[in-house]
Image (cartoon, rainbow, N blue to C red):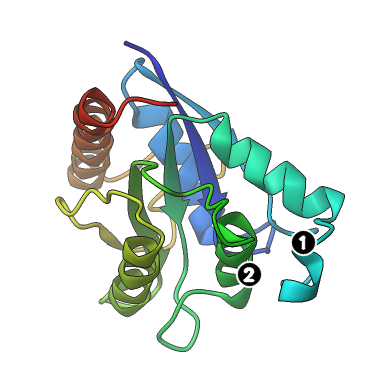
Amino acid sequence: MPYTVGYFIGSLSQNSINRTLSKALIRLAPESLTFEEIPIKDLPLYNRDFDADYPAEGRALKEAIERHDAVLFVTPEFNRDIPGALKNAIDWASRPWGTNSLNQKPSAIIGASPGKIGTAVAQQNLRGILAFCNSPQMSAPEAYIQFTPGLITEDGEVNDPSTEEFLRHFMEEFAQFVQRVLTVLPKG
């Protein structure tokens, strides 16, 4: 069965290595998954004063999440945590109380960094946030990508065979995870 995946790029940079990683993931994903980026750059900073009258940007974010079967987070690590823009988007998605768009939405996390531990600490923090939002998470394989020059081209072609194989496996596992979750927790 085909599934739609909304994906978040945690970095706002157009030249983000995580944006480049997302292109590789889409290229290597099984045909059963289709992808659409859920943009976060135009969201104002969330505060509960907006709950009574959600702005168009917040409604668009929630609607984008809700029309997809699953979500994929492709995020860098900023100061041992997720970027503020990504946390802000999750806050918009999960509010107002009782309208959490991430509730029971299958999710996976991956990230790239020039450092050897990839985005391990940010991913751990994001897992805690998504658990609070009741988003079932693919817990394995974990994917912390050390992004070295030339590893992935601008159009998403992976130049290292072992990395390509790992990313393909990650996406195949994600497709199977989405299917399992949605079999148990059907939409609607």
Whether residue 32 is visible here, answered yes or no, is: yes
Q: Is residue 20 above or below residue 67?
A: below
Q: Residue 43, position in %: x, y?
A: 77, 61
- Residue type at mark 1 is Leu
Q: Is residue 135 above or below residue 186?
A: below
Q: Residue at x 31, y 79 (%)?
A: 121
Q: Residue at x 69, y 56 (%)?
A: 40
Other-residue count near label 1 (Cα within 10 Å), few / some / many at <14 / 14–19 / ≥20: some
Whether residue 148 is visible here, answered yes or no, is: no
Query: In which image quadrant can residue 119 be found?
Result: bottom left
The answer for how far apart the CA atoms under marks 2 and 1 are is 8 Å
Residue on which the image places disc 2: 88
Helix, strand or loop at mark 1: loop
Q: Is 140 on the left or on the right of 44, as rendered?
A: left
Q: Which image quadrant: the N terminus?
A: top left
Q: Are marks 2 and 1 in contact (CB under 8 Å)?
A: yes
Q: Residue at x 49, y 57 (%)?
A: 18
Disc 2 or 1, which lies upstream in sequence? Answer: 1
Residue on which the image places disc 1: 43
